[in-house]
Structure formats: C-alpha cells, structure tokens
Amino acid sequence: MSIIRTDRWLLDSYDNPIEMCEKITPYFDDESAYDIYQYLTIHGMYRPLSRGVEQVKDLQNNGVWKMVERELRILQKYWGGPDIPVFIFPSESTNRTLIRNFNRKSGLAFHDKIFLFISPENKQKEINALLTHEYNHVCRLMRYDKKEKEYVLLDTIIMEGLAEHAVFEKYGEDYVARWTSNYSENMLEKMWQTHIFPNRNLSRTDRKYERLLFGLANYPTMLGYCVGYYLINNYSKKTNLKSKDLLTIDSSMLAQLKE
C-alpha cells in the first residue's frame, strides 16, 4: 500500500477537499468525506488558498512523495512495522500554532494509516523526522499488548515520548520537536509528580484528559507530551535500550512506577 499519490488528487481537486476526501472514505469506518475533512483540518490539513496548487507543485518538485516512501521502507525494516498507507497533504499555512510550535508541519497516526501535513518550506530531515514520529506510533499500537480503546493518560504520554525519543535517536537534538525543550528537568519532574502521576489512569473520555495531554486551560503548554518525553529519556538513559526495544514494554515500567 505505502505512499498514496495524493499529489495527483490535489492537482485535480485542491479547491474541493471534501470531494477529494471521498477517496479516503474506504480507509475509515462509516465516516463521511465531510467529517473526515473536518477532523483532518483540526490536526493541520490545509484549507484552500488562492495559490494553493503552487504549494502542491512545490512539494512535488521537492520530491516529497518519493522521499517519504524511501524513509518509510527504512523504518519498516528497522522496527519490523506494517505496510500501511501514508497520505501527504499541504499543511494549513495560516495556522499560527502550527507555525510557532511545529514549524508548519504536523502528522496524525492511526493503527492502520498515517497522514502527514507538510509545507514546501520543510526540509528533508524535518519531514523524515515527522514520519519517524508518526510511524513509531503505528508500531507501538501494533506491538504493545493493550487495546488502543483501553489506553489511559499514561499510555498516551508514553507513546508520545517514545515517538519523539525515536526522532532524537535517529536525527539528533536539532530535529526533535520544539516542545521538548520547553522546561527544565526539575520542572518536568514537578509536572510529573503534581499533574500527571495523580491523573495517570484517566480515560480518554474524561474532560481533563486532553487538558493534561496538550496543556490546555491553566496547565503548562504541551504538558503530557513533555512529561512523556522526559520519562522515556530517563528510562533510556538507565537501560541503554534503543527505540525498537522499547516498543513492547509496559507503560508503567517505562515510567518506572513502583506499583
């Protein structure tokens, strides 16, 4: 399956993304093209611009689709991961949060597919790092012996920490997400003890879950992500295990809980 040539879809239907998303409906269970598009835009997919087709051509000229396919093959071999479809679309170029915190790129992973939202301004290693993060999620969901619907807050922050640690392992500190350097180790330990640990078993349906994960309301920005990365770094330093060795380990063990 691998890389879906969405560039061809975009050249035909850029200005009508809902119609284009009709092609994606077979990859979802009973979701309409409208609902799929609305969900994808929440996570960074483009909204049509007057010169948007030029962005698509720029991505083509940058060789993005072939580049991602090469990197996916490398990751599949290294982690023993599945062959899944990857959909590439332009990112929303006017999204200030995307620009400020994620350098105009974002991704979305499911157990059986990945979406990448990319700007022509993103460099090759940035895009490969994004794919590494998202594909690590796919491999964790496949290899970890727990159903995704049963994930609690601790499972999710650990999954985010694993994915960004994989980026650090493969590409170094220059290519990890900006949020990884938001806080000092002392602050991260305090955030873990104060905010995340007492709420580690929150289900996804709990209103507090997303606030803690993303650092919404009065919580520190990207709270859960930052703490997850901190916990995985601590475990990796202690054990010297590589990203492929961490995929199957229980979240509580990775967090070094004594329970």
Image (cartoon, helix red, strand yellow):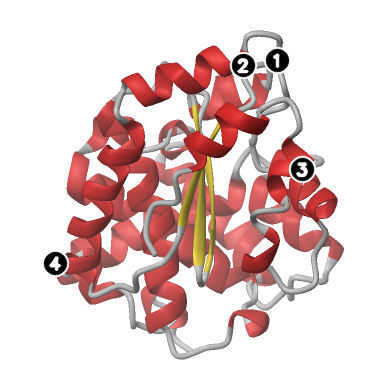
Asked if the residues shown at circle 1 and circle 2 are in contact, with their CB atoms under 8 angstroms apart, the answer is yes
**In the rendered image, the vertical position of residue 155 relative to residue 56, given as above or below:** below
Does the image show residue 21?
Answer: yes
Q: Residues within 10 Å of mark 3 (few under 14, many from 20)?
A: some
Q: Where's the N terminus, which quadrant?
A: bottom left
Mark 4 or 3 closer to N-term?
A: 3
| Sooner in the amino-acid sequence: mark 4 or mark 1 | 1
- Tag in front: 2 or 4: 2
Q: Is residue 124 left or right of residue 219?
A: left
Q: Residue at x 74, y 76 (%)?
A: 203
> For the point 62% across and 18% down, which residue is it?
93
Q: Which mark is residue 52?
A: 2
Q: CA distance from mark 3 to mark 1?
A: 16 Å
The mark lying in front, picked from 4 and 3, is 3
Q: Earlier in the sequence, mark 2 or mark 4?
A: 2
Q: Residue at x 26, y 45 (%)?
A: 168
- Per the model, the C-alpha gap separating discs 4 and 1 is 47 Å
Crowding near pointer 2: few (<14 within 10 Å), some, many (20+)?
some
Q: Which residue appears farthest toward the front when viewing the image? A: 12
Residue hosting label 3: 19
Q: Type of residue at label 1?
A: Leu
Q: Earlier in the sequence, mark 2 or mark 3?
A: 3
Q: Which residue is mark 4?
A: 240
Q: Secondary structure at mark 1?
A: loop
